[in-house]
């Protein structure tokens, strides 16, 4: 059974930092592109960024809204994905989902998400 | 960025109804279009990928069509468990973008 379990969310003040983790199991993590997708309360879905796999040079891409503030990394030996979030803004408040892509560039497996609240 | 526009934003229907949701892209995306279902408090679930391909385990009452800029998701006969919010997403180019969602509720 595929599982993606996020952790590390919580309440942080504007300008603060937070690091999210995602533990994957039930599939070959190293083969997959991995993404972060977020959803603000009561709103739609927003792609945050992705890391490609080793075969594609671990290339990382970000949404413009987080570029320069967020850093995605992965550890294939631990089947884990990370999101380091710095200089947080109130508009970063959202549930952050860890997502494994399928081979056809779709979001195949989703974690339940972890809530990040940026507020003073 | 490619803008994805869904219509309608909300829809009321009855069990057994045939329902169609539309997604329009601001430029051609070939068939790089995916559909997701989300229930309250849950993660989205992949239904359709590459515009027309049914994800494993998804009931055959769900179908997708379209190419270029105009796409549809059809549910042939609504079941009680289908009342949810549906999102389209383009994977033609980065950044991946989603439609605003269509909330389907019981009439």
Image (tube, rainbow, N blue to C red):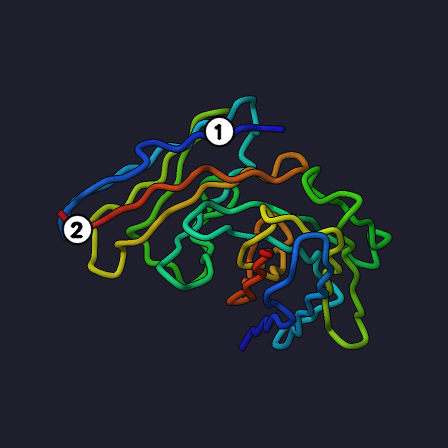
Measured as percent of width and height from the top left, residue B35 is found at 45, 46
Q: Which mark is residue B85?
A: none
Image quadrant in which you'd find residue A3? bottom right
Q: What residue is rendered at 17% in x and 51% in y?
A: B106
Measured as percent of width and height from the top left, residue B44 is found at 46, 57
Q: What residue is rendered at 64% in x and 62% in y?
A: A12
Residue in the foreground of this view, choosing between B44 and B15 = B44
Q: What residue is rendered at 56% in x and 53% in y?
A: A93
Q: Secondary structure at mark 1?
A: strand
Q: Are marks 1 and 2 in contact (CB under 8 Å)?
A: no
Measured as percent of width and height from the top left, residue B10 is found at 28, 39
Q: Secondary structure at mark 2?
A: strand
- Judging from the image, mark 2 belongs to the subunit labelled B
Q: Earlier in the sequence, mark 1 or mark 2?
A: 1
Q: Is A102 rendered above or below residue B17?
A: below
Measured as percent of width and height from the top left, residue A70 is found at 75, 52
Label 2 Cα neighbours within 10 Å, binned few <14 / some 14-19 / many ≥20? few
Which is more foreground, mark 1 or mark 2? 2
Q: Which mark is residue B67?
A: 1
Q: Give the residue furthest to the top.
A: B27
Disc 1 with disc 2 on a shared chain: yes
Left or right? Give the position of B86 relative to B29.
left
Residue labelled with disc 2: B106
Q: CA distance from mark 1 to mark 2?
A: 30 Å
């Amino acid at each position: 059974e595929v599982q993606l379990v996020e952790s590390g969310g919580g309440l942080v003040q504007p300008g603060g930092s937070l690091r999210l983790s995602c533990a994957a199991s039930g599939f070959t993590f190293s083969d997959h592109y991995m993404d972060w997708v977020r959803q603000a309360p009561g709103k739609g879905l927003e792609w945050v960024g992705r890391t490609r796999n080793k075969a594609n040079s671990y290339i990382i891409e970000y949404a413009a809204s987080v570029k320069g503030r967020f850093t995605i990394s992965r550890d294939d030996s631990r089947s884990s994905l990370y999101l380091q979030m710095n200089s947080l803004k109130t508009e970063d408040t959202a549930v952050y989902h860890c997502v494994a892509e399928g081979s056809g560039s779709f979001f195949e497996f989703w974690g339940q998400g972890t809530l990040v609240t940026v507020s003073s | 960025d490619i803008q994805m526009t869904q219509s309608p934003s909300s829809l009321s229907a009855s069990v057994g109804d045939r329902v169609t949701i539309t997604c329009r892209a601001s430029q051609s995306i070939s068939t790089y279009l995916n559909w997701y279902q989300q229930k309250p408090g849950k993660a989205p679930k992949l239904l359709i990928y590459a515009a027309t391909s049914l994800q494993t385990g998804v009931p055959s009452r769900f179908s997708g069509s379209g190419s270029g800029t105009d796409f549809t998701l059809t549910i042939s006969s609504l079941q009680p468990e289908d009342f949810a919010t549906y999102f389209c997403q383009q994977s033609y180019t980065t950044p991946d973008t989603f439609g605003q969602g269509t909330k389907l509720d019981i009439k």
